[in-house]
Structure formats: C-alpha cells, structure tokens
Amino acid sequence: MNITSASTGVAKLTYSLFPHISVVTRAGDDSAVDLFYNFQFD
C-alpha cells in the first residue's frame, strides 16, 4: 500500500489486492478510483 501527496492538494492511495490487480484512489480537486490489471510477457 502506498500513500502519496503532491503539492497540488491531491492525495493518492495505491492498494494491491492480488499480484496482478491493484486499486488506485485519488482525492482532491479531481477524485477518482481506478482498477488496474498488470501483466508481463516473459
């Protein structure tokens, strides 16, 4: 889990649910929730 904050007044929270799935939330002037699926080719 990562929490970051920028000088623009936006807080970002990244939470890994599973090795390939993570949820990213942002709060501030532009609030959002994103779901990411990561995959790699070996």
Image (cartoon, rainbow, N blue to C red):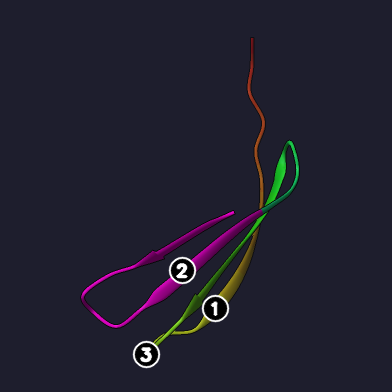
> Which sits earlier in the primary sequence, circle 1 or circle 2?
2
Residue, disc 3 = 29
Residue, disc 2 = 12
Q: Quadrant of residue 37?
A: top right
Q: Position of residue 7 (x, y in %)?
A: 21, 75
Which is more foreground, mark 1 or mark 2? 2
Q: Secondary structure at mark 3?
A: loop
Gap in Å between the C-alphas at discs 2 and 3? 12 Å
Q: Amino acid at mark 1?
A: Ala
Q: Position of residue 2 (x, y in %)?
A: 51, 55
Q: Amino acid at mark 3?
A: Asp
Residue, disc 1 = 32
> Which sits earlier in the primary sequence, circle 2 or circle 3?
2
Drawn side of residue 16 relative to residue 25, left or right:
right
Residue at far left of view: 7
Q: Position of residue 36 (x, y in %)?
A: 65, 52
Q: Residue at x 65, y 38 (%)?
A: 38
Q: Residue at x 72, y 38 (%)?
A: 20
* 40 in magenta: no
Tell me which segment is drawn in magenta: 1-15
Q: Amino acid at mark 2?
A: Lys
Which is more foreground, mark 2 or mark 3? 2
Gap in Å between the C-alphas at discs 3 and 1? 10 Å
Q: Quadrant of the C terminus?
A: top right
Q: Is residue 25 above or below residue 2?
A: below
Q: Residues within 10 Å of mark 3 (few under 14, many from 20)?
A: few
Q: Is residue 3 above or below residue 40?
A: below
